[in-house]
Image (spheres, rainbow, N blue to C red):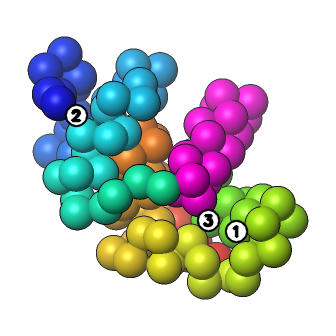
Amino acid sequence: MSLIGYTRDDEGYLVEPEDWTPEFARTVAVELGIELGPEHWDAIEFMRSYQEQHLVTPDVRYVTRHMSKKNGTGRNRIFELFPYGYVEQACKIAGMKRPRAWSTG
């Protein structure tokens, strides 16, 4: 897998979220030491859909609510899936720009 053709900023975030592909996600996940499973993809797909609809990276609260409703998981499940943080891992893998101001929910 290669990230050739993708432009990332100095912190590793995708510069143009519309350039995101599942291949990009798998490659970045490997870089970050995460093996993507169904729950990861559910979170990523929700994040991508939310960003497309609202033109902003979803706050972690929206993702945890989505996962809770769909899977019955607790509030901390997102942090179990992305142990080094929602912004640092989930947002990078999902191809989001780094949020300027952030709430960790």
Q: Give the prevailing secondary structure in the magenta stretch.
A: helix
- Quarter-wise, where is residue 104 in the image? bottom right
Q: Position of residue 30 (x, y in %)?
A: 22, 51
Magenta segment: 38-55
Three-letter residue code for mark 2: Arg
**Between disc 1 and disc 2, whose residue precedes?**
2
Distance from disc 1 to disc 3, alpha carbons, whole Å, reads: 6 Å
Q: Judging from the image, what secondary structure is the residue with disc 1 in?
A: helix
Q: Do the residues bearing badges 1 and 3 touch, measured as CB atoms within 8 Å?
A: yes
Mark 2 neighbour density, 10 Å: few (under 14) some (14–19) many (20 or more): some
Q: Secondary structure at mark 3?
A: helix
Is residue 44 rendered magenta in the image? Answer: yes
Q: Which mark is residue 64?
A: 1
Image spot of residue 31 (x, y percent): 18, 52
Residue at (38, 77) in percent of width and height = 83
Quarter of the picture containing the N terminus is: top left
